[in-house]
C-alpha cells in the first residue's frame, strides 16, 4: 500500500522538523546570552574607563599640587634673597592655588583611605608651613640670618616643603599603580567582551546556518513527498476507477445471471404444471371410468384402486401443483428484482408531497379494507428516480396496511424531514410491530417475520432495500413487537450515481 | 377455412415437454394442420430455407418460435426469416417464457407478428394455446412467392 508507506514517512519528516525548533530556541537563548554578556561587559568597561579617568584626574591634580608646592618654596626663597613685594604676591597666589589643588585632590580621593591619610599629612604640613611663610614675609632678616647660620637644608620651611613633596610623590605613585591596575582591568574586560560577544555571535551564526540547512532539506523532502503523494493519488484514482468498473461488470454479470436463471428455471415449471394437469385430466377419466364400472359390476369393486383414483392421486397432484406454483412465484420475484436492478435510473426533481399522495391514493382501497387511516405529512422535495421512490413508498405503506394490529384501529403516517444532505422519509404505523431480533431478517430475500397469516413471498422489503441502496440511500427500521413499526428511508437530497448500469 | 387447411405449422421449440403440451392443446382446439417440430434452430432454418417440402419450395407455413434455443437465439432465427425474400411474409408467432419488455420490443421490431408469453399456470397456458389454435383456424397466410 503506497499511501501507508507515505504516511509513515510523513510522520518521520514531522519528527525531523523538531531539531529545527530546538535549534531556533537555542539560537534565541544564545542571542539573549550574547546581548546580556555585551551589556554586562560594556557596563564593566564603562566602569573601568571611569576609574581610569578618575585616576588620571587625581594624578593631574596631584601634579598641580606638587607644582604649586614648589612655586611657594621658590617664591619664598626669592623673597629671602631679594625682599620685593612681587615675591610676596607670587607666594600668596601660589598658596591660594595650592589650597585649590588640595581641595580638588581631597574631593577626588575621598574613596581611598591610604590616600586620605596621606592627604591629612600634607594638610598638617601645609598648616605648619603657613606661620613659617608669615615669618619669612614679616621678618626676612631673621630668617635669612638663621639660614646663613644653619644652611638651607635645616631651615624649617624647606623641610616642610620637602616633606610635602615626598608625600605627594608617594600619592602620585599610588595613583600610578592604581592607573596601571585599572588599565589592565579595562583591557581584560574589553577582551572578555570581545570573547563572549564573539563566541555567542559565532554560535548564533552556526545554529542559524544549521537551521537554514535543515529547513532547506526539509523543504526538499516536502517537495519530493508532495510529488510522490500526487503520483500515489493519481494511481489511487486509477485503481478506484478500475475497481468501480470491475464492480459494475460483476454487478451486471449477477443481474444477467439472475435473469437467465429465472428464465431457465421457469421453463421446466411449465412442464411440471402442464403435465400435472394432464395427469389430473387422465386421472379424472380413469376415475369416471371406474365409477361407472363399479356401479355396473359391484363384484369388480376394488377399494384400493378406487382410493388411488379418488383420493391419493388428486392429493399428490395438488401438492405438486401448489409447490410448483410457489416456486413460480419465487422465480417471478427474483426476475422482478433482477429487472429492477437492470433498469436505468433517471433522476429528476420530485415533489415528494404529490408523490406520497399519489402512492397513498393508489392504496386507498387497501386502506379502506384494512379499516385504516393514512396521513401524509409535509416531506421536503428531493432529486431521485421517480419509479424507484414510488415503489419503495408503495411497498412500505402496503406493508404497514398489511400488518396492522387487530387490537386497535390502524393508523399509518408518512412524514419527512431534512437531515444534513439527506432527506429522511418515515413510514410509521401502529401495527403489530417486528421483534428486534428480526430487524435484519425482514430485509433479506424470501425471509419474513412474525405470524405468517398474510400472503407474501418475502420480496417487498428486500426490493425496498435494494432500491434504497441503488438510489444512494439507506433504509432502517425501528420497532418492537406489538408497538408498531417505523421504517425510515434516507435518500440523498441530490441524486448520486451509485453505479453505472445500462 | 380453406387456407388454414393447407397451412403447415412449424414449431421451433427445444423443450420436448412444451412442444407436446402445445401440440396437445392446438389439437384440442380442433386444429388438424400438420405440425412439424424442430428442437434446434439449425435444422429448423434448414427446413425453412432448403427442404423441398419446406415453405420456400412448398406450401405456406406459420412459425411458432421459442426464443431460448440451445444453438442460437430465437431472435436471430426471426431476423433470418424476416430478412429472407421468400419467407419474409410468413407469419411468426413468438411463444416463449421471456416477458422482458426489451425482448418483446425487439421481436416486434424484427417483424414478429404475435408475441405470446407462456404462462406457467397450466390453465392459462392451455387457454392461450387454444385461443392461438382458434386464431390459426381463421388466419389467412399469404402464398410464398414461387422461386
Image (tube, grey):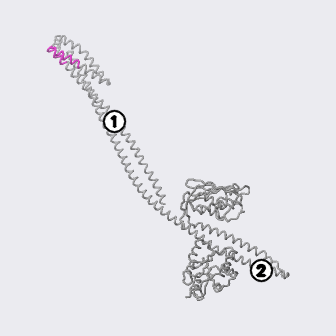
Residue nearest the viewer, comparing A27 with A165: A27
Residue beneath disc 2: A286
Majority SS type along the magenta span:
helix
Q: Quadrant of the C terminus of chain A?
A: bottom right
Q: Secondary structure at mark 2?
A: helix
Q: Residue furthest bottom?
A: B52
For disc 2, the chain is: A
Task: Establish if B53 lies above or below A409.
Answer: below
Q: Is residue B73 visible?
A: no
Is residue B23 rendered to the left or right of residue A155?
A: right
Foreground residue among A153 and A186: A186
- State the image coordinates of residue B15 (x, y, percent, origin top left): 64, 79
Q: Is residue A3 above or below residue B14?
A: above
Percent coordinates x, y for residue B122 in the rendering: 69, 75
Within 10 Å of the Cα at label 2, are there few (<14), some (14-19), or many (20+) other Cα atoms?
Answer: some
Task: State which mark lies toward you, 2 or 1.
Answer: 2
Dot 1 crowding, Cα within 10 Å, few <14, some 14–19, many 20+? many
Asked if badge 2 and badge 1 are on a common chain, one would say yes
Is residue A272 visible to the viewer in this orientation of the structure?
Answer: yes
Q: Earlier in the sequence, mark 2 or mark 1?
A: 1
Magenta span has A77? yes
The CA distance from mark 2 to mark 1 is 133 Å
Label 2 with label 1: CB-CB less than 8 Å: no
> Residue A115 versus residue B101: which sits nearer the camera?
B101
Q: Is residue A476 magenta?
A: no
- Disc 1 secondary structure class: helix
Q: Which residue has dot 1 on it?
A: A41
Magenta segment boundaries in residue numbering: A73-97
Amino acid at each position: 500500500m503506497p499511501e501507508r508507506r507515505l504516511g509513515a514517512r510523513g510522520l518521520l519528516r514531522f519528527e525531523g522538523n523538531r531539531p529545527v525548533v530546538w535549534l531556533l530556541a537555542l539560537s534565541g537563548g544564545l542571542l539573549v546570552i550574547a546581548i546580556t554578556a555585551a551589556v554586562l561587559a560594556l557596563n564593566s568597561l564603562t566602569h573601568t574607563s571611569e576609574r581610569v579617568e578618575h585616576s588620571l584626574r587625581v594624578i593631574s591634580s596631584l601634579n598641580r599640587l606638587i607644582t604649586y608646592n614648589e612655586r611657594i618654596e621658590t617664591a619664598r626663597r626669592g623673597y629671602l634673597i631679594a625682599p620685593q613685594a612681587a615675591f610676596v604676591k607670587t607666594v600668596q597666589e601660589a598658596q591660594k592655588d595650592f589650597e585649590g589643588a588640595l581641595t580638588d585632590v581631597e574631593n577626588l580621593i575621598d574613596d581611598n583611605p591610604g590616600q586620605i591619610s596621606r592627604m591629612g599629612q600634607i594638610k598638617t604640613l601645609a598648616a605648619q608651613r603657613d606661620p613659617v611663610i608669615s615669618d619669612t614675609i614679616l621678618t626676612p632678616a631673621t630668617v635669612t640670618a638663621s639660614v646663613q647660620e644653619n644652611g638651607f637644608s635645616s631651615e624649617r620651611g624647606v623641610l616642610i616643603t620637602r616633606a610635602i613633596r615626598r608625600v605627594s610623590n608617594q600619592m602620585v605613585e599610588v595613583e600610578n599603580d592604581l592607573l596601571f591596575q585599572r588599565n589592565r582591568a579595562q583591557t581584560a574586560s574589553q577582551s572578555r567582551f570581545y570573547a563572549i560577544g564573539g563566541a555567542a555571535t559565532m554560535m548564533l551564526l552556526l545554529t542559524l546556518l544549521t537551521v537554514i540547512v535543515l529547513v532547506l532539506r526539509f523543504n526538499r523532502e516536502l517537495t519530493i513527498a508532495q510529488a510522490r503523494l500526487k503520483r500515489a493519488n493519481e494511481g489511487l484514482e486509477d485503481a478506484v476507477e478500475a475497481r468501480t468498473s470491475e464492480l459494475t461488470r460483476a454487478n451486471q454479470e449477477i443481474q444477467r445471471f439472475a435473469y437467465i436463471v429465472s428464465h431457465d428455471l421457469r421453463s421446466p415449471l411449465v412442464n411440471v404444471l402442464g403435465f400435472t394437469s394432464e395427469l389430473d385430466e387422465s386421472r379424472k377419466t380413469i376415475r369416471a371410468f371406474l365409477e361407472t364400472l363399479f356401479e355396473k359390476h359391484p363384484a369388480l369393486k376394488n377399494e384400493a384402486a378406487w382410493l388411488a383414483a379418488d383420493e391419493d392421486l388428486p392429493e399428490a397432484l395438488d401438492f405438486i401443483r401448489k409447490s410448483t406454483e410457489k416456486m413460480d412465484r419465487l422465480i417471478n420475484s427474483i426476475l422482478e428484482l433482477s429487472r429492477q436492478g437492470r433498469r436505468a435510473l433517471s433522476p429528476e426533481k420530485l415533489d415528494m408531497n404529490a408523490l406520497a399522495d399519489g402512492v397513498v391514493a393508489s392504496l386507498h382501497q387497501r386502506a379502506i379494507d384494512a379499516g385504516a387511516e393514512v396521513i401524509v405529512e409535509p416531506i421536503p422535495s428531493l432529486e431521485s428516480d421517480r419509479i424507484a421512490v414510488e415503489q419503495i413508498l408503495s411497498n412500505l405503506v402496503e406493508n404497514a396496511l398489511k400488518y396492522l394490529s387487530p387490537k386497535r384501529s390502524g393508523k399509518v403516517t408518512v412524514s419527512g424531514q431534512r437531515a444534513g444532505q439527506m432527506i429522511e422519509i418515515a413510514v410509521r404505523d401502529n401495527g403489530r410491530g417486528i421483534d428486534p431480533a428480526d430487524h435484519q431478517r425482514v430485509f433479506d430475500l424470501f425471509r419474513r417475520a412474525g405470524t405468517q397469516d398474510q400472503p407474501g413471498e418475502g420480496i417487498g422489503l428486500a426490493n425496498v432495500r435494494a432500491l434504497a441502496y441503488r438510489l444512494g440511500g439507506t433504509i432502517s427500521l425501528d420497532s418492537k413487537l406489538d408497538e408498531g413499526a417505523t421504517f425510515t428511508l434516507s435518500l440523498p437530497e441530490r441524486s448520486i450515481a451509485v453505479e453505472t448500469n445500462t | 377455412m380453406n387456407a388454414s387447411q393447407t397451412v403447415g405449422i412449424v414449431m421451433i421449440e427445444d423443450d420436448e415437454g412444451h412442444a407436446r403440451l402445445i401440440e396437445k392443446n392446438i389439437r384440442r382446439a380442433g386444429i388438424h394442420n400438420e405440425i412439424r417440430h424442430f428442437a434446434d434452430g439449425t435444422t429448423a432454418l434448414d427446413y425453412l430455407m432448403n427442404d423441398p417440402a419446406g415453405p420456400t419450395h412448398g406450401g405456406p407455413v406459420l412459425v411458432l418460435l421459442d426464443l431460448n434455443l440451445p444453438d442460437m437465439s430465437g431472435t436471430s432465427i426471426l431476423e433470418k426469416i424476416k430478412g429472407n425474400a421468400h419467407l419474409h411474409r410468413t407469419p411468426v408467432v413468438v411463444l416463449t417464457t421471456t416477458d422482458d419488455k426489451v425482448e418483446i420490443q425487439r421481436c416486434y421490431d424484427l417483424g414478429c407478428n404475435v408475441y405470446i408469453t407462456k404462462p406457467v399456470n397450466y390453465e392459462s397456458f392451455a387457454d392461450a394455446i387454444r385461443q392461438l389454435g382458434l386464431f390459426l383456424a381463421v388466419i389467412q397466410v399469404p402464398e410464398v412467392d414461387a422461386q
